Image (cartoon, helix red, strand yellow):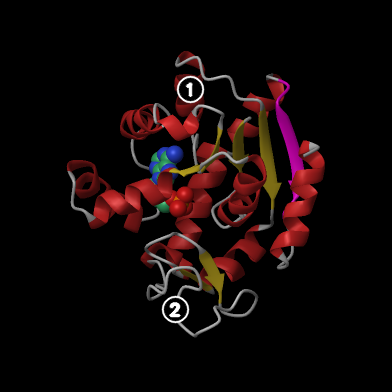
Amino acid sequence: MKLILLGAPGAGKGSQGEIISKRLNVPIISTGNIIREAIRNETEVGKKAKAIVEAGKLLDDATVVAIVEERIKADDCKNGFIFDGFPRTIPQAEALDKMGVNIDKVVNIEVTDEEIMERLTNRRVCPKCGIPFHLINRRPKVEGICDACGAELIHRADDSAETVKDRLDAYHAQTEPLIDYYKAQGKLLSTNGSGSDIPVVTQRTLDALGI
Ligand code: AMP
């Protein structure tokens, strides 16, 4: 199964993707995680991306499409994958179509901007495995430490209130048009992503997908 998780930053694509990925036994591909790793490793892409990511803007389509094209060639993608944070613009979606990638379903996870703001400003993430925690709703077992790998959790620079506002603006202007794009292809499902109980919210998505 090839799935796209659509929705604003902080809509729960990463946390829901974690669960769906285990259920379907296919990898979750987060372009945000790949780009952040490139920034940490100071690669060419990373150097170009740093200021853009910190400003809450989108990286250029050609760079992101090249990253994805390379990633989906890997062996673990042969039975499918879940995209988290890609495509984020109409040209990226068109590039995916041109590559001949046949997406089965696109899930639009709906959450209000107010709830997104509350989630992201309270979010702490593991820089190693990407798992998101929340200061109130999903506290790590040991404060400041990732449950899964023991790394020290961070507050992403782009999760500050000011940058979240810019990311939401980018989402509404550049990503939201994808809802109609995939509706026209007959692939769109919408789920209510509101709420803090991740398994409960994810169940709505699993039900919508019939898996
Ligand atoms: P995310 O973790 O998905 O919110 O991504 C973090 C940042 O990486 C975004 O704010 C963008 O700067 C960049 N990024 C991730 N995915 C994409 C994409 N598909 N197109 C453009 N920029 C992206």
Question: Given the current orientation, which residue lies at the most extreme bottom position?
Answer: 143
Given the image, on which type of amino acid does mark 2 rest? Ile
Which mark, residue 42?
A: none
Looking at the image, which residue is at 58% across and 19% down? 102
Looking at the image, which residue is at 54% across and 74% down? 122
Residue that numbered label 1 is attached to: 96
* Crowding at mark 2 (Cα within 10 Å: few <14, some 14-19, many 20+): some
Q: Secondary structure at mark 2?
A: loop
Q: Is residue 23 left or right of residue 81?
A: right
Magenta segment boundaries in residue numbering: 186-193
Q: Is residue 70 left or right of residue 145?
A: left
Magenta stretch encompasses residue 201: no
Principal secondary structure, stretch drawn in magenta = strand
Picture mark count: 2
Q: Quadrant of residue 73?
A: top left
Residue that numbered label 2 is attached to: 145
Q: Are marks 1 and 2 in contact (CB under 8 Å)?
A: no
| Closer-to-camera residue (73/105) | 73
- Work out whether 146 lies above or below 205: below
